[in-house]
Image (tube, grey):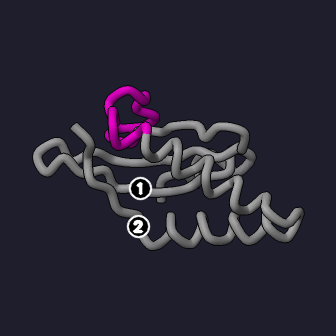
Amino acid sequence: MSYSYSFREEATREFAEAYIWYEEQKEGLGKTFKASILAKLNQVVNNPLHYAKSYKNFHQALANKFPFLIVYTIDEKDKHVTVIAIFHTSRNPKKKIR
């Protein structure tokens, strides 16, 4: 059973900024980045418990082809995933969960 999902405002901003940055590097690369993140998110919502907890109740899934983690929480009762961050792996890991 697939879970519903939503993005926190910060995650939406990070996603948009990364998309723009990749698109500025090479036309079409931003679209490839977006597709990669959404494909991984689709895997997450289909099986959110598959991905390891990184800290307390926060899970993370590594995107394919791009150095980004999808950091999320799971509400089992409501069958809902909340994306906390779209986090570049070169950043300070302490900033993943604000």
Tag 2 and tag 1, C-beta contact below 8 Å: yes
Direction from residue 21 to residue 79 in the image, left or right: left
Please state the extent of the stretch shown in magenta in the rendering.
Answer: 43-58
Q: Position of residue 25 (x, y in %)?
A: 88, 64
Q: CA distance from mark 2 to mark 1?
A: 6 Å
Q: Nearer the viewer, residue 60 or 55?
A: 60
Q: Quadrant of the N terminus?
A: top left
Q: Earlier along the polypeptide chain: callout 2 or callout 1?
A: 2
Direction from residue 77 to residue 26 in the image, left or right: right
Direction from residue 92 to residue 84 in the image, left or right: left
Residue at left offset 47%, top offset 59%: 98
Direction from residue 15 to residue 78 in the image, left or right: left
Q: Amino acid at mark 1?
A: Val
How many residues crowd mark 2 within 10 Å: few (<14), some (14–19), many (20+)? few
Circle 2 residue = 8
Residue at left offset 35%, top offset 62%: 6
User: Quadrant location of residue 20?
Assistant: bottom right
Residue at left offset 71%, top offset 43%: 67
Could you say whether the residue bearing mark 1 is in a helix, strand or loop?
strand
User: Quadrant location of residue 63?
Assistant: top right
Could you say whether the residue bearing mark 2 is in a helix, strand or loop?
loop
Circle 1 residue = 83
Q: Position of residue 69 (x, y in %)?
A: 58, 44
